[in-house]
Amino acid sequence: MTPEQLEELLLKIQQGETSIESGIERLSRLPFEDIGIAQLDHHRSLRQGAPEVVFGEGKTSAQLQAILTAMARSGANILITRLDIDKGTALHNQFPAGEFDADAGTFCLVQQPIVARGGKVLIVCAGTSDLPVAREAAVTAKMLGNPVEELVDVGVAGIHRLLAKGDTLREAAVIIVIAGMEGALPSVIGGLVSVPVIAVPTSVGYGAAFGGLAALLGMLNSCASGVTVVNIDNGFGAAFAANRINRCGQA
């Protein structure tokens, strides 16, 4: 339940359009709902400003469908991450109004209007191979109500491609920088802008990249002050952090 939905319910009770008993019954499910395989946190939007997001990896299609069905009853917007083609297709078949993004591995069901607020979240992707992580970040940021712009394939191997986008970099409120290999791109961008930079190492790279560990260590040791680093391939976490930074800027 969002703050807007709670306010609407309380107003209806106050104006006699909804009975007190009906309001109590609805609010009784507000903290959480136990559906056996999961305990859904309907209260999270009120506490954190964003509804619970479902991590799809490791869950079966049947479990995800049960979770989605229960969450949809609340009327909230729903985001499920880390889905493969089979799970994403099954969810889309169940809820055709939703959108499965195969590149991002996400499923979105929008039941409430999303109004973009705050400054622009710019998502910069070093290479095309990093796109799945970038797409996860983009979908997440948009679902949380942020204006989003994406720059693709502007890694340090051809730095002129990035430098040509100087105006775009300077217009952003928060920048998410996604890179594999040696993970150098966040340091470059961190040295060019004054806004928060969130670095995301990816598992893209040859043997000595160690599944993203080399990029992670490179980003953690960035010489550009103020670069923040999230876990390997964690586009979702970067977008969630960017959303909170963006919201703070509105205060």
Image (cartoon, rainbow, N blue to C red):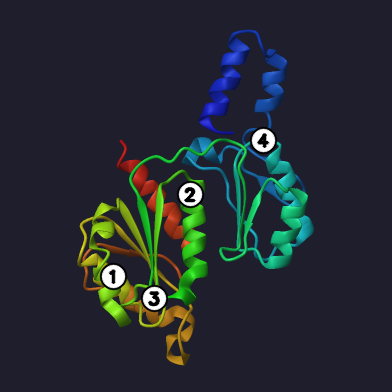
Pointer 4 local density, CA inside 10 Å: few below 14, some 14–19, many at least 20: some
Image quadrant containing the C terminus: top left
Q: Which residue is mark 2?
A: 142
Residue 146's spot in the image, x, y percent? 42, 46
Q: Which residue is mark 1?
A: 162
Instruction: Say which of 208 and 85 sits in front.
Output: 85
Quick check: 65 above or below 165?
Answer: above
Quick check: 54 above or below 20?
Answer: below
Marking on residue 74: 4
Disc nearer the start of the sequence (3/2): 2
Residue 214's spot in the image, x, y percent? 39, 82
Q: Quadrant of residue 112?
A: top right
| Viewer-side label of 2, 4 | 2
Disc 2 secondary structure class: helix
Q: Quadrant of residue 201?
A: bottom left
Disc 3 secondary structure class: helix
Q: CA distance from mark 1 to mark 4?
A: 43 Å
Q: Which residue is mark 3?
A: 216
Horizontally, residue 54 falls left or right of residue 25, namely left
